[in-house]
Amino acid sequence: MSMFQLSSFFLLLGIKYSKTDDGEFSHTNKIILLNKKGEVFHQNEGLKENIEESKKILKELFWYDRLR
């Protein structure tokens, strides 16, 4: 994936990032779940938010996929 493609992908998902003076990157923290069409069907903003719903969805998806 090129840097342009990655930047475009971040832009579409609303993820902001910047390079810091020490060469590291500062970025938005989000949990974003996409469906098979690449559409956002769930997102959790920030790491301080309650992520229980995200965890529940991921567990359901994991077990559904394993049972197929």
Image: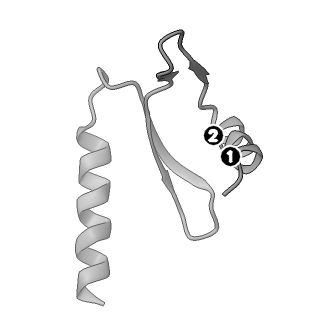
Q: Residue at x 23, y 61 (%)?
A: 59
Query: Which of the labelled discs sits on residue 67, or is there none?
Result: none
Looking at the picture, does residue 55 appear above or below residue 24? below
Position in image of residue 47 (x %, y %): 32, 26
Q: Position of residue 4 (x, y in %)?
A: 77, 44
Vertical arrangement, residue 65 with respect to residue 60, above or below: below
Tell me which corner region of the image, top left, top right, bottom left or bottom right, holds residue 38: bottom right
Q: Which residue does the numbered mark 2 point to in the structure image?
A: 13
Residue indicated by mark 1 = 9
Quarter the N terminus occupies = bottom right
SS of the residue under disc 1: helix
Residue 45, picture quadrant: top left
Give the Cα distance between marks 2 and 1. 6 Å
**Residue at point 70%, 45% (across, down):** 3
> What amino acid is at disc 1?
Phe
Q: Is residue 50 above or below residue 26?
A: below
Q: Position of residue 20 (x, y in %)?
A: 53, 13
Question: Which image quarter is the C terminus in?
Answer: bottom left
Picture coordinates of residue 57 (x, y %)?
31, 56
Q: Are marks 2 and 1 in contact (CB under 8 Å)?
A: yes
From the image, state whether disc 2 or disc 1 is nearer to you. Answer: 1
Please give the name of the residue rendered at 64% of the width and 68% of the height, measured from the top-left corner.
37
Amino acid type at mark 2: Leu
- Other residues around mark 1 within 10 Å, as few (<14) / some (14–19) / many (≥20): few
